[in-house]
Image (cartoon, rainbow, N blue to C red):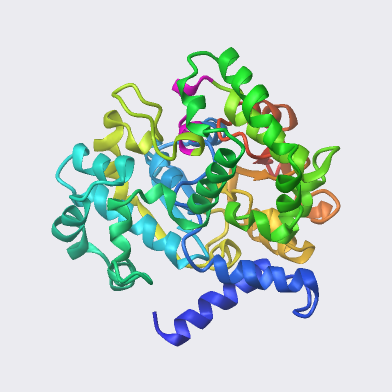
Amino acid sequence: MTMIETAGVGARIDGAVVRTPALSATGILERVFSAAFRGLVYPQIWEDPLVDMEALALKPTDTMVTIASGSCNVLSYLTANPAEIIAVDLSPAHVALGRLKLAAATHLPDHTSFSNLFRHANLKSNTALYDRHIRPHLDHSTRAYWDGREANGRRRISRFTRGFYTTGLLGRFISAAHVIGRIYGVDPRDLLRMDSVEKQREFFDTRIAPVFESRSFKALTSMRASLFGLGIPPAQYDALAGDAPDGMIGALRERTERLACGFPLKDNYFAWQAFGRGYQPGEQASLPPYLEARHFETVRRNARRVTIVNESITALLAARQAASVDAFVLLDAQDWMTDRQLTELWAEITRTAAPGARVIYRTAAAPSPLPGRVPDGILDKWDYRVGQSRDLGAKDRSAIYGGFHLHVKRDQAA
């Protein structure tokens, strides 16, 4: 990227994250987080695509706008055959990852090679797959990103030969959590040997839960910067800490417990990523839909329906025609936003939403952030599905959010 392009990216991320003066303690943290977010944060997205697709009920005629993140869900949505997906992200690294996945789906010779690159993500042969089949088809900025050198002199694409899911802020955070566990005599990988939910819970109660009560762990997580590795900025830290009676420790313990015990391990690839640092081995493994062999040809056929751009979702919607979007996926981005930013976003969502359009998002705390912050004149055009949101949130295997939320555009004649 040129210096001008880099400055533009930084300004967009600052605009999303920075909320307080630079000389305040929170302001400093926000700027540190903004700088960190310019690199790779999420090697894998942490929202359950099966829950998303159930909520959105995508049709072959639908146009979707979504935040990209690691693009696992962008490609998984293709299994529902929507007409078009426009994915946006403020992080150039996330944009480069999404475009890499699309090019790989289109140009790799078969599912085995696709799986080698994105499921196993640790094979020495993966750089050859990239150079031969993918690199010639990438746009200039995406090719420059993956060909670019890291501090150790290796090309970024070599991350897929060394364990891609241990990289990025989130990957390094989970690796650090494993180190902390071993310091306290717990190997998180041992959880994956449990063959029932009951044994999973026993392992959590007796081995993992005590770590949360340790003095050093409490001291570590009391610092807002400690959760930057989870992609949690200061504003979202405060929301998460306020979602449990005993603060951040309680919130983290509750979310980890649900991840470890809330679903059978054989059905939950999020637990395998957290406790095993990769996807489950074997033909019957739980995987994101886009990595399942049965979906490969559908993903390959539909990959050209996706566009991924380095932009904010509000700015992208502002350039679209009215009533032109059927589905919106906001991830947890609203936890970062000011009242003004929320209002601007929902004004554009409401303007561009087709009749019956659906919006989904997640939040660190349980309640929706919209009431009292977005004008009633905007929210009154939407039906907030309280019961359905609660039921869908209970199905989310990633288990790390306090709330899942679904809004449906009301009939203007109603």
Quadrant position of the C terminus in the picture: top right
- Residue 111 seen in the current view: yes
Quadrant position of the N terminus in the picture: bottom left
Q: Which residues are magenta?
A: 264-273
Does the magenta-highlighted stretch encompass residue 207? Answer: no
Q: Nearer the viewer, residue 346 or 159?
A: 159
- Which picture quadrant has residue 339? bottom right
- Which picture quadrant has residue 408? top right
Q: Is residue 281 left or right of residue 375?
A: left
Q: Can you say whether 356 is above or below 369 in the image? A: above
- Residue 233 seen in the current view: no
Q: Can you say whether 208 is above or below 360 in the image? A: above
Q: Locate residue 255, reporting x and y percent.
A: 67, 35
Q: Could you tell me which residue is drawn at 71 percent across and 54 percent down?
A: 335
Q: Is residue 199 left or right of residue 250?
A: left
Q: Locate residue 395, reporting x and y percent.
A: 59, 26
Does the magenta-highlighted stretch encompass residue 272? Answer: yes
Q: Is residue 7 left or right of residue 242?
A: left
- Which picture quadrant has residue 345? bottom right
Q: Nearer the viewer, residue 276 or 17?
A: 276
Q: Locate residue 284, reporting x and y percent.
A: 33, 21
Q: Can you say whether 135 is above or below 213 in the image? A: below
Q: Nearer the viewer, residue 57 or 203?
A: 203
Q: Locate residue 262, reporting x and y percent.
A: 61, 23
In this figure, what is the number of numbered marks? 0
Q: Could you tell me which residue is drawn at 60 percent across and 64 percent down?
A: 314
Query: What secondary structure do most residues of the magenta stretch adopt?
Result: helix
